[in-house]
Amino acid sequence: MERMNAAKAAELAESKLISGPAENEIERVERDSREAGPESIFIALKGEKNDANDYVSSAYENGCRVFLISSEKAAGQLAEHDDASVIMAEDTLKAMQVMAKNYLAQFDLLKVAVTGSTGKTTTKDMLNCIFSYKYKTVCNFANYNNHIGVPLTVFNVDSTTEVGIFEMGMNHMGEIEVLADIVRPDIACITNIGVSHIGLLGSRDNIMKAKMEITTFMDDKCTLVYNADDDKLAQLADMDTPYKKVAAGIDADLDGVVLLPLGSGENIVAYSPTEAANEGVTFMLRYNGENIMFYMPLQGLHNASDAAIAVGAAVTAGMDIMDCSEALLHIKLTGGRLTVRISGGVKVFDDTYNASPDAVKAALNVLLDDKSGARRVAVLADMLELGDRSDEYHREIGKYAAERGVDLICTVGENAGSIADGAEEADTAGIKDVKIMRFKDCDDFTAHADDIIKRGDVVLVKGSHSMHMEDAVSYLLKLGSELGQEEAK
């Protein structure tokens, strides 16, 4: 963050400095009173359970001297301290968002935003990997992709930043528009339109509208890179838009990932990726008439599609295609996204960050393509926010897993029971018997894991974030270590 004083912070937040020194300096933004300290501004956000205005005294004791608050009570507490700079706002969240928007607008940098039902964090990681190969880059960390996380990411930008990459998530209409207003992206990327949050938005058409909010503030100097293989996004090809378009996808008539004329925009086509077990994904990209080989040390052929989108954004920004290829050799994904972890002869595919039907099928494909283990085990937890069709989507996953030949399916959670139902109803004629086990929650699974998981198993763990399946991964790795020690004896 670029250093500023309390008066400047109040100006950017379009709020009033009601007391204290105007010259108190800040160099970071905190929303947790325990983290607030010297040269920080403590933004007192109201949550569902807690109001951070109640903790201003704690932040002051930790050394914080600049505060953005919305409570008269908090203002009274801080008025006791002559050295505390107090900025008052009616709504501290909105004030923080306005502050982030005005703060970011001060800098001359390329701003890239990415959203989508699945793959947006992977694509964000790829964008960060590519752009940071040549430029000083800032991007979201962890899951900081919402109405709070994006503003906090913005405050990591400073005068030396050349590229800002902002992942944008949502589960309601209007959320991405707020984030797009803060960032005002030069390049926007949309990975796909799936069924995540369909229970809240009602239809894929509404999800499309919500995702397209990322383009609200884009003009003819801006570019949208989108997945043309998605049936909803493919409609963009025939739409007149105020911004330029780059389509990314698979074209069976072409033999590579290609940049080609397509209407008023351009087209990047990922084609014929191949995957070597435990090694990674290889695919071709054609640009300016030349075929370029790409390799990424990631599991899952679906990653080629996300890479095409990321490369499309990079070449649109003027990066050399060979630099993109070189950069992706070193790609590492945010934790919990189809990461291979091996412990004592048990291989675990950790894909615990989140879950939707498309993402679960992609992860199952990775599991089923792995031939290294004695058994392939799928530990599948609830997929959430799927609305009235939740049972149908879960059954579809169970049928898919069983008919593709998963050896053991362990379902975790009430909704995931329908995965087991679908697996039991699947036509598995000619396929070895599929064993199915049901567990009420993650703790129930880990309590029985010692009797289930064997040395040599390859295990996929997948489920929505709130199902806490990362605990299952930790337990399986511990169990694998124990099994390895027993084998050594």
Image (spheres, helix red, strand yellow):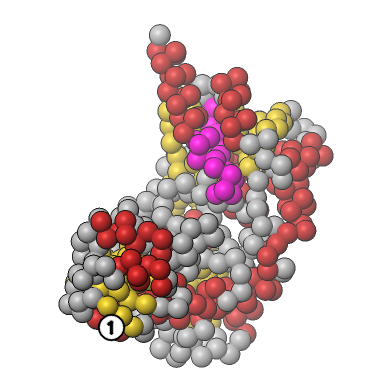
Residue 432 appears left or right of 361:
right
Q: Is residue 99 covered in magenta?
A: no
| Image coords of residue 356 (percent x, y) | 62, 54
Q: Would you place residue 48 above or below residue 405 in this image?
A: below
Q: Amino acid at mark 1?
A: Gln
Task: Decide which of 465, 356 is in the foreground and name it.
Answer: 465
Residue 383 appears left or right of 246:
right
Few, some or many residues within 10 Å of mark 1 (<14, 14–19, 20+): few
| Image coords of residue 120 (percent x, y) | 49, 62
Q: Would you place residue 385 above or below residue 105 in this image?
A: above
Q: Is residue 458 covered in magenta?
A: yes
The local secondary structure at tag 1 comes to loop
In the picture, which quadrant includes the N terminus? bottom left
| Image coords of residue 90 (percent x, y) | 45, 78
Residue holding disc 1: 106
List the single residue furthest toward the top.
Answer: 489
The magenta-colored residue range is 457-473
Residue lying at 45% horizontally and 26% vertically, measured from the top left = 478
Dividing the picture into quadrants, the one containing residue 446 is top right
Task: Decide which of 440, 323 is in the foreground and name it.
Answer: 440
| Image coords of residue 255 (percent x, y) | 51, 64
Residue lying at 41% horizontally and 64% vertically, measured from the top left = 53
Residue 381 appears left or right of 350:
right
Does any portion of residue 253 appear in the rendered image? no
Residue lying at 42% horizontally and 42% vertically, measured from the top left = 279
